[in-house]
Image (tube, helix red, strand yellow):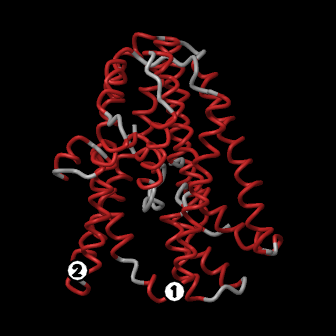
Amino acid sequence: MTPTVSRRMRRSWYRPSLTVQIMIGLVVGGVIGWLRPDWGNAVYFLRDIFINLIKSIIAPLVFSTIVVGIAGAGALRKVGRMGIKALVYFEIVTTAALFIGLAVVNFTKPGAGVTLTSGHTEIIKTLGQSQPKTLVETVVHVFPSSVIEAMVRGDVLQIVAFSVLFALAVSAIGEKGEPIIRAMDSLSQIMFKFTNYVMLFAPIGVGAAMAHTIGTQGLGVLLNLGKLIASLYLALAIFIVLIFGLVIWIMRVPLRQFVRAVREPAALAFATTSSESALPKAMESMERLGVPRHIVGFVMPTGYSFNLTGSTLYLAMASVFVAQAAETTTGWHMSLGQQITMMLTLMLTSKGVAGVPRASLFILLGAL
């Protein structure tokens, strides 16, 4: 074993990954809440700090990534029809993932029986009153009268609508818009780094939240969380078999070669909890399979922003899980129309954040 490898192993031993730290925080917080419920209530403010930090990221992160993703997509003109087909495919499979997640979570109802903490019940009760009721009101609500006000309120759908129109305008002015694209790219990178800093606080914030939850509701609440996880894996299995299986069969993809090509990128993304880290290796593997370089150069990076099927499936299920818990607590019921509206919001807000570990947490909070 070389000295370099030995040093890396020592560092990984003393500094576990963030995922491991979060799991440790969950366990420690659960034990504290179980043994000393009063301590769980005392540390709840740490959870609030963590959530506030997350919410502060949402608006600039969504705005910058959407502008860069749309205004900077000059490769679309070069790839032509293949690019259009790729974008259509991305949206079709993403929509399928959302509907599968919605169907499974409404069938299994993992949130039924979960009671929300009293500090949030009034917010949940007013949620239905604050949202548009009719189709016309919903459409009008999408377009903000002030984007600053939308950012202050955290209205992600309005931020997305403004960002899309802004990106189209930047793209339309050609070279004069390039400084804006570069600035937005810099802002997105800054927000990615800021996100990493915030996530360093995640084990403490998550542990405090778990301590409060167990301290106030007992260990029985974990059964419902287990039902959510089991429902998620069921939905993922259905999606892989039905959607990916159908695509592989229609396109006659050589399954064995494809699995060999994606094995290493998938392992890298799993280890780093960021799919963006696997992009160079994935592009290399696709070229090795015989896919032309100009197609790989557009489709792969675009897919990392527009083809987040796993994240969108989870977002659909987690959102309805929270709504089911809200119905148990307050009696407020999320209608099918409201669920579909939220799915459309999730389809838009899940774009462009593939480089952020656990980015689904940020988007979920923004949609609720």
207 relative to 358, above or below: above
Residue 332, image x and y in percent? 43, 21
Could you tell me the amino acid type at mark 2?
Gly
The disc, 2 or 1, on the residue closer to the chain's N-terminal end is 1
- What secondary structure is found at the residue carrying circle 2? helix
183 relative to 192, above or below: below
Q: State the residue at coordinates (61%, 75%).
A: 281
On-image quarter of the C terminus = top left
Residue 117, image x and y in percent? 41, 17
Left or right? Give the position of 206 relative to 47. right
Residue occupied by mark 1 = 79
Left or right? Give the position of 154 relative to 76. left
On-image quarter of the N terminus = bottom right
Left or right? Give the position of 333 relative to 44. right
> Mark on residue 164?
none
Residue 6, image x and y in percent? 60, 61
Q: Residues within 10 Å of mark 2 (few under 14, many from 20)?
A: some
Q: Residues within 10 Å of mark 1 (few under 14, many from 20)?
A: some
- What secondary structure is found at the residue carrying circle 1? helix
Residue occupied by mark 2 = 177
129 relative to 274, above or below: above
Q: State the residue at coordinates (46%, 15%).
A: 329
Left or right? Give the position of 168 relative to 355. left
Could you tell me the amino acid type at mark 1?
Val
Image quarter for residue 350? bottom left
298 relative to 352, above or below: below
Q: Nearer the viewer, residue 325 or 131?
A: 131
Q: State the residue at coordinates (36%, 52%).
A: 195
Residue 110, image x and y in percent? 62, 27
Q: Are marks 2 and 1 in contact (CB under 8 Å)?
A: no
Image quarter for residue 331? top left
Query: Gap in Å between the C-alphas at discs 2 and 1?
Result: 22 Å
